[in-house]
Amino acid sequence: MRILIHGINFHPEPTGIGKYSGEMAAELVAMGHEVRVVAAPPYYPDWRIGDGWRNGYSRHAWKGVDVWRVPLWVPAQPSGLKRIIHLTSFSVAALPVLARQLFWRPDVVMVVAPALTSAPGGWLTARLSGARCWLHVQDFEVDAAFELGLISANGIVRKLVTGIEQWLLRRFDRVSTISWRMLDRTRSKGVERDRLVFLPNWVNDQAARPFSGPSRYRQELGIADDAIVALFSGTLGGKQGLELLPKVAQRIRSHPKLVMVICGDGVMKPHLEQACAGMDNVRMLPLQPAERLAELLHTADIHMLPQNPGAADLVMPSKLSGMLGSGRPVVTTTEPGTELAHVVSECGRVVPPGDDPAFADALIELADSPALRQQLGLRANQYAQKHLIRSVVLGRLDRCLQACATHTIAGVELPRESTQTPK
């Protein structure tokens, strides 16, 4: 089967959407499919074109995937309007490359959002080539932009933008997303139930197995073997609520064993480095290579997952899959009733957004109770094994792609008329 994947991010090394798109494409090739990708050169999370890449049209092969790169405008300091121009520049520049794919005659065209601005070009390519069209929603960027104040919440503007979004969603033969609450939201936007597919961000099977041997990270960072490591690993972006971490680090400084490790790159990194300067209980790491991800995640005794309250149930954090797979408890900030709260309450602690005293107390509670950490970590790994390991998720994707290409109505078997978060 010929599968065309269209999305702005495609790079297997960083964490986040680009990594998942890369792994998905490579796995589909391994399953015997022909896969082409139309994407931008790597630029995220640093908001600059990556070293060794040029911002122009190019074509190369990666793990059997035929990758077509498209130029785009990358703002040094992204804001609401600049982000829109940035995404639009990619979507417009991609049109001639998408037109060339008509002669390849794909069976399925999959658009990965963000960015939703890529959806019209992908949908048109599918219709003109006779292919089925699939939209995969990593987050509801339109809703999040309004909730986080990136776009003015003017009533007329919001009605117009959300109307366009809903019209686009209803044009696709399949719409997948990464959480059950997001599936509910997709249905509320007018997408029929039998077009939905549950496709969560996965964790590599290896990362969900017990890690053998001591972690080199403790030695490299000068962390004692008996210290309790609280880890945040991921993109240091503006929508994660990361400004909480320095405040928490200050509150746990008196604990004799707790050490905070912040790993990643992004726009928040300079602020975090400045705010944590002089704290001997904080270690900063740049983004780590993919082959060391399992070791990094298993270095933690506790995972930290702060979130911006405005994005609740609009963005299911992709990093959660790896945290759960590592078999460690998670401390997160979110409102009660969200899917994130539902999942983490079974295998960690949930505290109110922005509440650094409660977050610090949760870390101290877990640090002082090895038996509780072990119990919650076991539940985390069991959830990952059942719902999130790569072989399970991508096996479902393959079956659903086959059904989509053959015009069969087979999305995902939902447990009830309303999608519910499974245990």
Image (cartoon, rainbow, N blue to C red):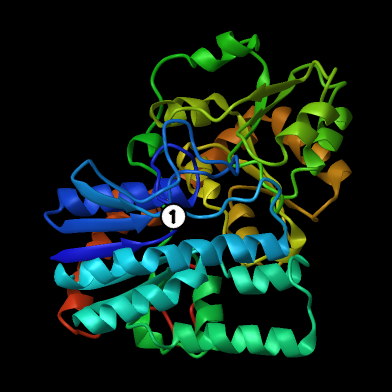
Where in the figure is residue 407, as x and y percent of width and height? 19, 84
How many marks on residues?
A: 1
Residue 322 relative to residue 25: left or right = right
- Against 179, is 375 above or below? above
Within 10 Å of disc 1 (Cα), the crowding (few <14, some 14-19, many 20+) is many
Q: Residue at x 78, y 75 (%)?
A: 152
Answer whether residue 148 is visible to the viewer in this image: yes
Q: Residue at x 50, y 71 (%)?
A: 116
Query: Which residue is nearer to you in this view: 369 or 273?
Result: 273
Residue 223 relative to residue 422: left or right = right
Query: Which residue is nearer to you in this view: 76 or 354?
Result: 76
Where in the figure is residue 22, as x and y percent of width and height? 34, 48
- Against 317, is 63 above or below? above
Where in the figure is residue 136, as x and y percent of width and height? 41, 68
Residue 271 relative to residue 414: left or right = right
> Which element type, helix, strand or loop, lies under badge 1?
loop
Quadrant housing the N terminus:
bottom left
- Against 74, is 147 above or below? below
Where in the figure is residue 421, as x and y percent of width and height? 51, 69
Answer whether residue 423 is visible to the viewer in this image: no
Label 1 sits on residue: 201
- Against 202, is 246 above or below? above
Query: Which residue is nearer to you in this view: 9 or 292?
Result: 9
Q: Residue at x 19, y 82 (%)?
A: 130
Find residue 277 and report its image quarter. top right
Residue 65 relative to residue 217: left or right = left
Mark 1: amino acid = Asn
Query: Which residue is nearer to you in this view: 116 or 49?
Result: 49
Find residue 370 and report its image quarter. top right
Q: Residue at x 16, y 65 (%)?
A: 2
